[in-house]
Image (cartoon, helix red, strand yellow):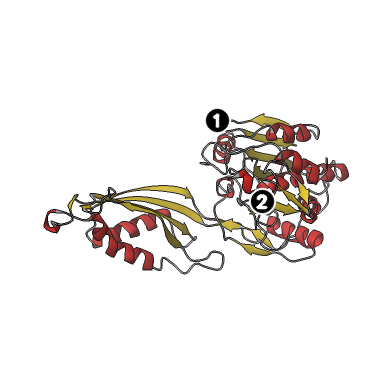
Amino acid sequence: MNVLELAQALIRRPSVTPAEAGCLALIGERLAALGFTLERLDAGGVANLWARRGEEGPLFVFAGHVDVVPPGPEDRWRFPPFSATVAEGRLYGRGAADMKSSLAAMVCAVEAFLAGCPAHRGSIGFLLTSDEEGPAVHGTRHVVEVLRSRGLRFDYALVGEPTCERVLGDTIKNGRRGSLTGRLTVHGKQGHVAYPHLVDNPVHRLAPALAELVATEWDRGNEHFPPTSLQVTDLHAGVGATNVVPGECRMTFNFRFSSEQTPEGLQEWVEAILHRHGVPFSLSWELGGRPFLTPRGELVAALSDGVEAACGIAPRLSTSGGTSDGRFIAAICPQVVEFGPVNATIHQIDECVALEELEPLAAVYRGVLERLLPPAGEAHARS
């Protein structure tokens, strides 16, 4: 199977998170035929595959996820979401862009690379999970902890997230912002609206502090990251009656933060604002991930050169967008980047990828391997 055929085969397996629906077996069969050793590292109902070919360093790892988000109302799709239909130069289906085309391209790239360079330096690995679109607790995070407990570290990792904005090759992600979620409860006293002296309205208590929170300039970012931002994602109070003052107000908010901040510092800053305004509150925090950055070096150079060779354009580096499993891999790998197809339709009705992106994507991945893992004795990628 070429890239298109393998991508279609993966899309036809309805691997709505955390299901893998046979995707890992399909990929594993192709990798085993190339001499990869396969190991399932499942946990908590999540399927994970660790595959490696070779024992020597450096270790280059392709990483990604086979799970997809739910398709939504299927009657609104132009074609059934798991039919992998080709029409008008595009491959349609849930996961077409995020990220089954990338996985197919990775496998085909390795096959082509090994056919032309069976005695390459170093080792190649695959870290695949079915828990990236879900809670992301028992997937890549778990595999990384298992491998770290064995003393294993990667030298390079390439995550196949859809990174490009307009055309294939325009954007490489060389880092991501951190994510920190706060769940705030403001405590008040419920009562009748006609007797304000007998109530303590938690919405009124929160309002001045909330105004300061949303107006605060947390930082101005830096050359690699945009400024830290806070967004309220949920705000609720009331019992459903127009004549009752609520006793509690609950708010959920999220920081996407740059390397100018730490989660501990943001927590202290928020709590100081709440205290300064006299807000009676309880607050819990959830750290989704710390920011990571891969500066220009061997991996960025190899990927940039591979993109220029296959796509004819010079990619720009970016740290924008949401979180990815790269944040977990960065704990055991000093160089982590992301590169994949155009992301214009991910998580949408009629998700699709242009057919003209598929083979060049595999060529980019193959080019990275050729630059970083050439035959023993040959020079590897510039830094």
Residue 329 x %, y %: 59, 46
* Residue at 68% over, 54% down: 339
Q: Is mark 1 on a helix, strand or loop?
A: loop
Residue assigned mark 1: 45
**Closer to the camera in the image, 61 or 44:** 44
Q: Which amino acid does label 1 sit on?
A: Gly
Above or below 354: residue 211: below
Crowd band around label 1 with a 10 angstrom C-alpha radius: few (<14), some (14–19), many (20+): few
Residue most extreme to the right:
116
Residue 275 x %, y %: 25, 58
Report whether residue 219 is seen: yes
* Residue at 58% over, 47% down: 325
Horizontal placement of 280 versus 216: left or right? left
CA–CA distance in space, label 2 to label 1: 27 Å
Q: Which of marks 2 and 1 is nearer the N terminus?
A: 1
* Residue at 83% over, 49% down: 377
**Closer to the camera in the image, 98 or 33:** 98
Q: What element carries label 2?
A: loop
Horizontal placement of 362 versus 342: left or right? right
Report whether residue 58 is seen: no
Residue 294 x %, y %: 61, 57
Q: Which mark is residue 317?
A: none
Quadrant in which the C terminus is drawn: bottom right
Residue assigned mark 2: 351
Residue 45 x %, y %: 55, 30
Q: Which amino acid does label 2 sit on?
A: Glu
